[in-house]
Image: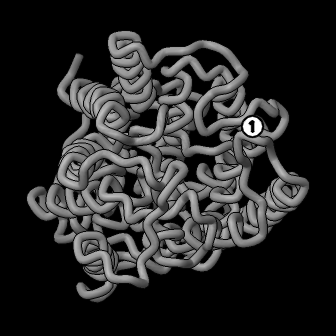
Amino acid sequence: MVREVDARGLLCPEPVLLTKQALDALGSGTVKVLVSSAAARENVSRLAESRGWQVEVQEQGEDILLVLTKR
Amino acid sequence: MNGKRVLVVAAGGTLGLLAVVLVAMGNPANMGYCVACFLRDITGGLGLHRAAPVQYIRPEIIGLVLGAFLASQATKEFRPVGGSSSFTRFVLGFLAMIGMLVFLGCPVRAVLRLAGGDLNAGVGLLGLAAGVAVGVQFLKSGFSLGRAVPQQKGNGYLFTGLVVLLLILLLAHPSFIFFSEKGPGSMHAPVWAALGAGLVIGVLAQRSRLCMVGGIRDFIMFRDAHLLYGFVAIFVVALVGNLAVGAFKIGFAGQPVAHSDGLWNFLGMALAGWAAVLLGGCPLRQLVAAAEGNTDSALTIMGIIFGAAVSHNFGLAGSPAGVPAGGQIAVVLGLIAVFIIGYVNRPAAVKRGVSIGKGS
């Protein structure tokens, strides 16, 4: 199951909060998070890694796509 | 410790060390670095308030913005964005400044004051944490100022451009710029030292995202202490530094550029913390974000400057003599205003995440 979170243009902690809701709701699988600042990238990555999700970072033009996966 | 953790500790530690050095070189005691105080001094230096003891174009702020700007250019993190409830952010910046000037310092100076033995700052920090905790409840119930969207390039450079203008005004010192002849504004490290310290802190703050309000917020919301390590580092290094140079004096009474009215120290910082958590970060972080091209943060800084002007024009700011009645009323009205802003902006007016969030 894949969930997508669009956190573009939001200042922290909102991207982290939205990601946390998605991770908690899903438990495992794939969550794609789209952010637009390096600070959001780091904060979302830190949250995901602390909860045992793997983080893959892809640049998408001005935005950054974070693919979070957990088996 | 991973790389990110090392960076935030290095940023905090460097800030703590440079703050002690800047005081030794001439800055007011326990005011080696203070974003609120220095923006207040700049406001006075420009003549936007006429409180003679607190007027100076502080190079630390200029250096911080230039350092953060250069770092964001080098890392390609510079993004001209804006449009996230800009005027609400201006108002929140204004309200936060009213609170910080009642307390006499921003979150950074609160930690530096505590590291100098000023226990009033401990009361202020408790107030800050309380304000952040209340703000977190608003965030949890859906508070949002909405999305920022990309802006034309020029918008992102304008703030740093204004700061370069400040540097020119500082160096040229034309007659319409005010420099205090006595009081805290007259006490300052040499320009090159303050500018250099600001540059270093600006680069490190941009790289590490150092933020006191964010640290308390993340700890309450996610039990994530990452950013708090930075502030522990400021405290530890400044404490050791103050002990080493004999600048440590523990107690409540007679602390430098401070008062011992606990209620208003607490409530002033509670107002600042509550407003700042709704803004997404403390004044230091707003300056860095403005340098990175965020025009909403630039407008927040303008709100802070407006707050400094109003505070001193209408006698609201605290002083070693205490907090005037006008300042007490302003803090209470400010808390009510932040409550209203927090209330009307939740649940979020903006469409939230695609497949999660309220209403989707």
Relative to residue B121, is residue A55 drawn left or right?
left
The residue that mark 1 highlights is: B265
| Residue B353 can be seen in this image | no
Relative to residue A49, is residue B339 drawn left or right?
right
Using the image as rendered, state which of residue B278 and residue B157 is in the foreground.
Answer: B157
Amino acid on which disc 1 is placed: Asn
Task: Give the residue displayed 53% in from the left and 69% down from the top.
Answer: B44
Query: Compared with residue B307, is residue B228 higher up or lower down, i.e. above or below?
Result: above
- Give percent across and percent down for residue B162: 32, 79
Name the quadrant containing residue B54: bottom right
Task: Give the residue displayed 38% in from the left and 22% down from the top.
Answer: B238
Crowding at mark 1 (Cα within 10 Å: few <14, some 14-19, many 20+): many
Name the quadrant containing residue B304: bottom right
- Give percent across and percent down for residue A21: 55, 43
| Residue B68 can be seen in this image | yes
| Outermost residue toward the left in this view | B74
Using the image as rendered, state which of residue B152 and residue B120 is in the foreground.
Answer: B120
